[in-house]
Amino acid sequence: MFLSFSSKAETLALLRGKLNAARILPLTYFSVKEWSSSPEDVAGRVRRDLPAAPWIVRSSCWSEDHSGGSNAGAYLSIPDVVAEDFPEAVSRVAAAFPGHDDNDQVLVQPMLRDVIRSGVAFSHDPKTCAAYRVVNWAEGPDTTAITGGGEDGRIWLGAQRSPIGPPEELLGVCALLDELLELFGGIPVDCEFAVTREDDGSECLWLLQARPLVLGADPEDPEAQERRLTSIADKVKSGMRPHPFLMGERTIFGVMPDWNPAEIIGLKPRPLALSLYQDLVTDSIWAYQRHNYGYRNLRSFPLMLQFFGQPYIDVRLSFNSFIPADLEEGLAARLVDYYIDRLLDQPAHHDKVEFEIVFSCYTFDLPERLEKLGEYGFSQAEQQAFAESLRRLTNRIIHPKNGLWKADADKLDVLSARYDKLAASDVDPLERIFWLLEDAKRYGTLPFAGLARAGFIAVQMLQSLVAKGVFSQAERDRFMSSLSTVSGQLARDRGALDRATFLSRYGHLRPGTYDILSPRYDEAPDQYFDWGHYSEDASESGSPFSVSLPQLRAIVALLEEHQLHPDGVGLLNFLQAAIELRELAKFQFTRNLSDALSLIGKVGASFGFSPEDLSYCDIAAFRGLHNGATYQRDVLERSIEAGKAQFEQSARLSLPPVISRPEDVWAFELPKSEPNFITQKDVIGSVVTEEDRDKLAGAIVCIPNADPGYDWLFSYPIAGLITAWGGANSHMAIRAGERGLPAVIGAGQQRYDQWSASRRLHLDCANCRVRILA
């Protein structure tokens, strides 16, 4: 006979004496009605049934823990209550109950002492409804550190049938979850726990609360989870082996190290978005352009893999592609292994590998930065050879007359001309989709990849001028805010242009550039803009920036010392142009992509498929329709059904952002990230999401990931920005710097969840700190 959940107090009373994995404190409870009618009798019972005060007075409301929802944390608990303050504490707890149900209960227990660890644990992952044990805990005496939303907690996930056990400190908690599942007949469980240090030095686990875990769907069969994770672990194991055409003894898989799929298409993209990103960027374009710019040839290697639809970058491939093509093989191989070891030591740098791990270009402070290679056995001669190789590569890219970035900038005009020509033609929709995407690759993402490379070099060059003392960090920020990108122009045009003209220029943009379910600006203009009001604060223009004569002389001296080709003015022009053109290239190719998505929607609709259906379709299906005669509806239907099956698998999947070994697929602790703080400013504001359009003014906006389609946010006078994913040189980092907006880019999932769930935050970017105020 299985147990049944009841109120918090009654469930704990029911479990007392039945648990082997944990203990339950003595308790007594009473209804609001009992307290109202005879408070003296109730107080006497508490003194009789419990050890001497202090006590904790807790809510045990009937609406708090039930199968329809737990309302966890919505009620009041008062710790360290002494006997004389007991009546007031009960009154305060009861007053916090919603409604006036006299049957609601108040629970009283003795206070725990010598707590060393506490937290909450789930038998299933609430996000995926899969059988992952999820434990969120904090070390220390504060039992509210997790339930109160503290930022110092740790999160561990482990599949139910994982061959990898939990960390030693969580062994008892996982055993408790298993025992509760057995006692309650497999009903998903959510519990709160604490661990105390006993007099003999041993640890004791206490169950503080147990309730049903409310899931958005039926929990998944652990056998299905086991099959899926076994397949992924086998793929990871295979990828870890040495490869005859790659340097590096092993690899790592990550969601952000290169081309940032978590930021651009999300952690769990629909199949259409995933396949478009592969086709336009990560299958071949990335390697083709990197080779053009003087790095090693990786043209036959797809950069991005997918594990049941969840995208990951093969980091060994990425690190190989950052090696100059003319570097000696032995030295190159050792560098790749060094990069991988560095990332394994500091996985929080997975979203900033070009700034913290890899040496991908020559900068003014490169010789000093290369000195750390000596600690890993690289000789002075090898460091010098590497520096010379990077110098040759960088000079080819930034040359004032023949720089590679200049040719790529010219290709954007070709893309625009071909777009106009295609728009004026009468080709059928399938033909138009094909050529929009082909041109997006040849004249869009290909030059964008080159200009993005130039943009990375520009930002690193600029930062090296700070390191050399030529610019202060504040001057560096002023330079960034002086830029005039297409995104900045959008904000200014929002106030200067009429609605029709504005939408004709920017209407193709859509949040979620690769997502057919994300409406374009011109498809849902009222969703993004308040056309009746416009704030001048949102229409920022570039802040003035100037270089003093001594600074220019210092730059010229550095250029001569390091044998870099541009003169002082030429270098500053490159820094500005590279960053601005990178953003322009992105704007240009997204027009082709956005039009193709609109046409895909129209073609699909002609066969009875909705945009929701088409989001599960692989772009290869539309290429197939263009390339031959076939039963077109059947082709799309098969692709949609296969995509739905794949996405269902992805929706049940929880994986870490960095996979360094096959075992990580089964069990992992979420790593702490190192967010990228933009500007030296600080701001206090209320927290809103992109959907709270009426509350954006003066608020700190939280969005999981952001691409140029989110630039509509800057038409509002927002006070700050936080994203879960994004690198130090991502679009939103550049955009926030240009605007002078305090921002936290790439907070990581754990911190983002905490910050976005709060009501009010303090962003202190100068001190790299975010404080929850409410």
Image: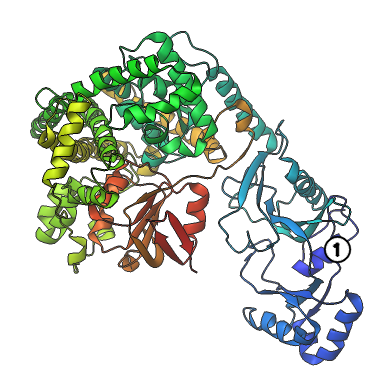
- The answer to whether residue 80 is left or right of residue 397 is right
Q: Secondary structure at mark 1?
A: helix
Q: Nearer the viewer, residue 360 or 258?
A: 360
Residue 20: tell me if it is visible. yes
Residue 550 pos. (x, y %) = 14, 44
- The answer to whether residue 713 is left or right of residue 584 is right
- The answer to whether residue 474 is left or right of residue 246 is left
Q: Is residue 378 above or below residue 244?
A: below
Q: Quadrant of residue 407?
A: top left
Q: Residue at x 52, y 26 (%)?
A: 341
Q: Residue at x 88, y 74 (%)?
A: 50
Query: Residue tagged by mark 1?
Result: 14
Residue type highlighted by circle 1: Leu
Residue 45 pos. (x, y %) = 88, 82
Q: Nearer the viewer, residue 369 or 123?
A: 369
- The answer to whether residue 428 is left or right of residue 11 is left
Residue 34 pos. (x, y %) = 80, 86
Residue 653 pos. (x, y %) = 56, 38
Q: Quadrant of residue 656?
A: top right
Q: Residue at x 14, y 61 (%)?
A: 495
